[in-house]
Image (tube, rainbow, N blue to C red):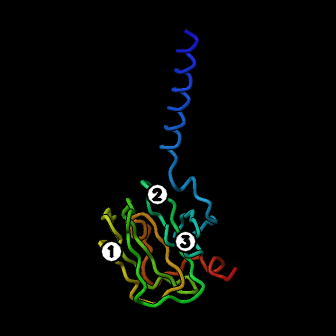
Amino acid sequence: MKRTLYVSGWMMVLGLLVLTLASTSGEERSTLERATLKMAGETLSVEVARQADERAQGLMGRDVLAPDAGMLFVYANQQSPEAAFWMYRTHIPLDIAFLGADGEIRAIRHMLPCQAASSAECPRYAAKVPFHAALEVNAGYFRRHGIEVGDRLPVAPLLAPR
């Protein structure tokens, strides 16, 4: 009898651990720098991806992004208009704003999830403007908050070289 209870107890602990890990979103496990942006009367909590590997990972593999969250991709040098993002293994429809060094929104694109077997099969979303940073948020966020091309976001301190 003790043996059955012992195994059952471990099975329960293992089950709880699996449920806990499954319910924890990628956002909660992230080790990226975090910042808060105040814009359009709203507060947006962003993870800041500065390194190439952080930018490559982006929001890949996440099933949810909080309504008031996003990811800011920061580049040391201005990126060309041909630079593009893709949604390989990204499960969340997103909007992306391409920003100048002063935080001005130069372009906004809508990006759809891509579950293709290889990244080469996913559409690429070119900036079509030079940019120093890109801000990804849930699809529709910019429209819902009246944020558009030409608006300036308070990201300049985050774009300064570190």
The reply to whether dot 3 and dot 1 touch (C-beta < 8 Å) is no
Give the image location of residue 51, x and y in percent: 59, 74
Q: Residue at x 57, y 71 (%)?
A: 49
Give the image location of residue 38, x and y in percent: 58, 68
Residue where numbered disc 3 is placed? 53
Give the image location of residue 25, x and y in percent: 50, 51
The number of callouts visible is 3
The reply to whether dot 3 and dot 2 touch (C-beta < 8 Å) is no
Is disc 1 surrounded by few (<14), some (14 to 19) or many (20+) residues within 10 Å?
few
Residue where numbered disc 2 is placed? 65
Residue where numbered disc 1 is placed? 120
Question: Toward which corner of the image does residue 75 lie, by quadrant?
Answer: bottom right
Give the amino acid type for the residue marked by disc 1 in the picture: Ala
Give the amino acid type for the residue marked by disc 3 in the picture: Asp
Q: Which residue lies furthest to the top in this view?
A: 1
At mark 3, the secondary structure is: helix
Q: Which of marks 2 and 1 is in front?
A: 1
The alpha-carbon separation of the residues under discs 3 and 1 comes to 18 Å
The dot on residue 150 is none
Q: Residue at x 56, y 14 (%)?
A: 3
Question: Toward which corner of the image does residue 95 lie, by quadrant?
Answer: bottom left
Q: Residue at x 42, y 70 (%)?
A: 142
Tell me: residue 125, above or below residue 89: below
Mark 3 or mark 1: whose residue is earlier in sequence: 3
Q: Which residue lies furthest to the right in this view?
A: 162
At mark 2, the secondary structure is: loop
Q: Residue at x 42, y 63 (%)?
A: 138
Give the image location of residue 131, x and y in percent: 50, 86
| Viewer-nearest residue: 15 or 1 | 1
Give the amino acid type for the residue marked by disc 2 in the picture: Leu
